[in-house]
Image (cartoon, rainbow, N blue to C red):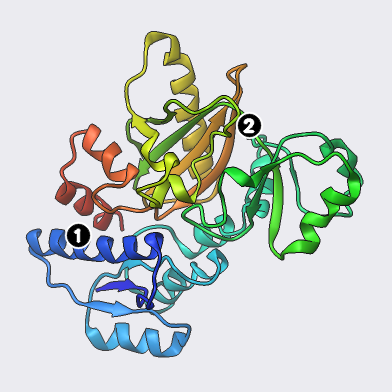
Amino acid sequence: MIMTDPIREGAKGDELDTLAQVQQVRRALRRLGHSVEVSYFSLNLTAVAKRIKASGCDFVFNLVENLPSTRLLHLVPLICETIGIPYSGGSSTTLSLSADKVESKRLLTLADLPTAPWLDSPHRPDIKAFINTPLIIKPRAQEASVGIGEDSVRSYAHLRDLRAIFDAEDDLFAEVYIDGREFNLSILPGSTLLPPAEMLFIDYPKQKHKVVGYAAKWDEHSFEYLHTRRTFSFGDEDRALVERLGALALSTYELFGASGYARVDMRVDAALCPYILELNSNPCIAGDSGFVAAASEAGYSYEDLIEAVIQER
């Protein structure tokens, strides 16, 4: 069974991408010889559990991505764990730990893994340290770069303006903006690290902030989408950096108790200091996604990749 979200009328790019994943994963599973049905998740958890049991399925492919908050994404694996059905992707523990970006950063800090300084409350005693510092304002509990764009990078000269971030909208936090390179480290079940990718910002004007935000991922007509490119090619001068990023990605994967497929996103500053942005458990696996591109770079066909995902448990 593929468990996914019902697509609402007027769905945006990230939501439509889930539909593409469902179609592509279903096709791959059938080519691998599996019988497949698609079922739609709801917050009536009892009904969802009954539906899974009644289907007689022996595996749930979890493609639920568009809930109101990432804090709810652990519900699908939690149901499967409760009724004893194997499933794809991250466990309820992993999805719960990684759901809130601020709590994730606290966990990274406790584990002595590098992440950018952040501000999550107007009452922090060290708030003055963030004055006149470039910050990127992010939602605490959203995926697919929802709510993130170039205008998310701001600097505040006055304490009152900095504190006003938290009055304007709930569930935001401010992270020190790392002006540098961005990398994606994709990991298959069993801690298999796929080839690392760097997101290149092509011909960006000097004053334009380099952010892989919502437009860069989903708006095909935007400057960001047209001028952001992925590369798997690195020179000898980057060898030590790439090795370090791989080690950090695996440490992050282990920290969050991950066992399914995942991606760790990082930024690297001009001094070659890496900063972990987040662990993305169950990243997009549409055919044009970064995760699939990394698998392809490692020699996996799409069917090979789906087979690796469903063989994890």
Q: Is residue 251 left or right of residue 293?
A: right
Mark 1 is on which residue type?
A: Gln
Query: Left or right of 163: which side holds 302?
Result: left
Whole-number angstrom distance, CA of label 1 to CA of label 2: 35 Å
Q: Which residue is mark 2?
A: 178
For the view shown, which residue lies furthest in the top direction? 236
Instruction: State the residue at coordinates (14%, 58%).
Output: 28
Q: Residues within 10 Å of mark 2 (few under 14, many from 20)?
A: many
> What amino acid does circle 2 point to?
Ile
Camera-side residue of 93 and 159: 159
Q: Is residue 256 above or below residue 82?
A: above
Q: Earlier in the sequence, mark 1 or mark 2?
A: 1
- Image-based side of 33 in relation to 250, left or right: left
Total labels: the figure holds: 2
Circle 1 residue: 24
The answer to whether any part of residue 191 appears in the image is: no
Residue occupying image coordinates x 40% and y 55%? 282
Q: Is residue 186 above or below residue 5?
A: above
Quadrant location, the N terminus: bottom left
Given residues 294 and 216, the one toward you in this image is 216
Q: Position of residue 209 (x, y in %)?
A: 58, 34
